[in-house]
């Protein structure tokens, strides 16, 4: 399965609680990066907080930094 790198670039402070919960569900906190499987559920969460994150394709064997 393909992997994607999700990096938080803006703070969730001041965002609606639904957006903060989505960031937490993605495994993001304190503007770090996380590697997730590329599936429709993750894509839907990314779409909800697209103004707070950047998404790119993860390199083979890449791990998170947090």
Image (cartoon, grey):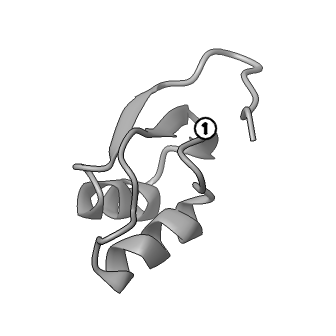
Horizontal relation, residue 50 to residue 9: left or right? left
Q: Residue at x 58, y 46 (%)?
A: 37
Q: Quadrant of residue 27?
A: bottom right
Q: Residue at x 76, y 29 (%)?
A: 63
Callout 1: 10 Å neighbours few (<14), some, many (20+)?
few
Q: Which residue is mark 1?
A: 1
Quarter of the image that includes the C terminus: top right
In the rendered image, the vertical position of residue 29 relative to residue 36, given as above or below? below
- Looking at the picture, tell me which residue is in the foreground, 1 or 47: 47
Horizontal relation, residue 22 to residue 50: left or right? right
In the rendered image, the vertical position of residue 46 relative to residue 63, given as above or below? below
Q: Residue at x 39, y 66 (%)?
A: 13
Expressed as whole percent of the image width and height from the top left, the position of residue 10 reads 35, 46
Quarter of the image that includes the N terminus: top right
Expressed as whole percent of the image width and height from the top left, the position of residue 59 reads 62, 15
How many numbered badges does the structure rendering display? Answer: 1
Expressed as whole percent of the image width and height from the top left, the position of residue 15 reads 29, 71
- Looking at the picture, tell me which residue is in the foreground, 15 or 56: 15
Q: Quadrant of residue 41?
A: bottom left
Expressed as whole percent of the image width and height from the top left, the position of residue 34 reads 62, 42
**Residue sitting at the far bottom:** 17
The secondary element bearing badge 1 is classed as: loop
In the rendered image, the vertical position of residue 52 relative to residue 23, given as above or below? above
């Amino acid at each position: 399965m393909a992997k994607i790198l999700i990096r938080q670039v803006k703070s969730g402070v001041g965002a609606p609680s639904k957006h903060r919960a989505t960031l937490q569900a993605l495994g993001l906190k304190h503007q770090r990066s996380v590697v997730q499987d590329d599936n429709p559920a993750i894509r839907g969460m990314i779409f909800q907080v697209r103004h707070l994150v950047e998404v790119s394709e993860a390199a083979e064997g890449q791990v998170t930094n947090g």
